[in-house]
Amino acid sequence: MLKTHSAFDFLEYLATSGNGSNEPIPSLEALSKKHGVSISVLREQLQVARALGLVEVKPRTGIRRLPYTFAPAVRESLFYALARDRHAFDQFADVRRHLERAYWFEAVERLAPDDIAQLQDLVKRADEMLHDDPIRVPHAEHRELHLTIFRHLENPFVIGLLEAYWSAYEKVGLNRYTGIKYLEQVWDYHRRMVEAIAAGDHAEGHKLLDEHFNLIDRILE
C-alpha cells in the first residue's frame, strides 16, 4: 500500500541521484512504485522543486534537473516580504549594495576583454536611449551592466542574491522613468566605472561604485 507521506524526499533525491542536469528523472509513477509513496505527495514535492528552479517539466521530455541557482528561492521569499511590507525592498537593496562593494575587486579581476567590450556597449546603448526622442529608460541595460560585472564570481549564492534584487527592483516599479537628470547622473557613473575597469584602475572603479550608491541613497531619502 502506498504511503501518503514518506521518508522519501524528492529534493534529496534530486541532489543525490545522477551526475548531470541532462540526465532524465524517472516519472512520478515510476518513483511512486519504487519508493512506495503516493503520487499526490510526489506531485506536491515536485511543485516545490519547480518553484525553487531545480527542475523543469515538459510534456515530451518529462522531468529534467536544472543547473543549480539560488535566485528562485530568494525571489519567492522576497516577493512575499514585499507584499507584506514595501520597506523590505530598501532593506534588501542595502544587502545588495554591501555585496557589490565587498565583491567588486574579486569580480572585476575576472572580467575578460569580451566582458569589458559588452559593458562599453551597454553604456553606449544607454546613452543613445537617453537622448532618443522620446526618451527610453535603459532599465534592461542597467540590470545587465551590474550583473555582467559580477557574472564570473564562482559563488551561486552571491549571484542569486544579485539577480533577485533586480527582480524585486522591477516588482516595486523602480524600472520606470525617474527623470532625465537622475538617469544622466546614474549613467555618468556607469560610464566612468566602465572606463576605470577598462583602464585596470579597479580602486577608482570601486570609489565610483560607492559614489553611485550614495547618489541612489540621496534620491530615495
Image: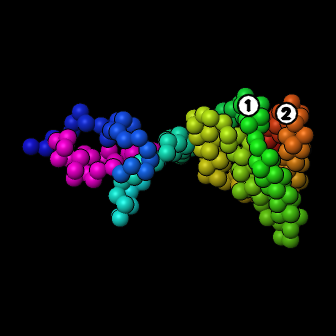
SS for tag 2?
helix
- Image coordinates for residue 135, horizontal then vertical, percent: 83, 66
Residue drawn 82% across and 60% down?
125
Q: Which mark is residue 202?
A: 2
- Image coordinates for residue 64, horizontal then vertical, percent: 39, 52
Check the image and report above or below for 54 versus 133. above
Q: Which mark is residue 106?
A: 1
Q: Which mark is residue 152?
A: none
Residue 9 appears in the picture as rendered:
yes
Q: Amino acid at mark 1?
A: Glu
SS for tag 1?
helix
Magenta residues (range): 25-52
Residue drawn 68% across and 43% down?
151
Q: Is residue 7 left or right of residue 105?
A: left
Screen quadrant of the C terminus: top right
Residue drawn 16% across and 42% down?
36
Tell whether position 202 is magenta: no
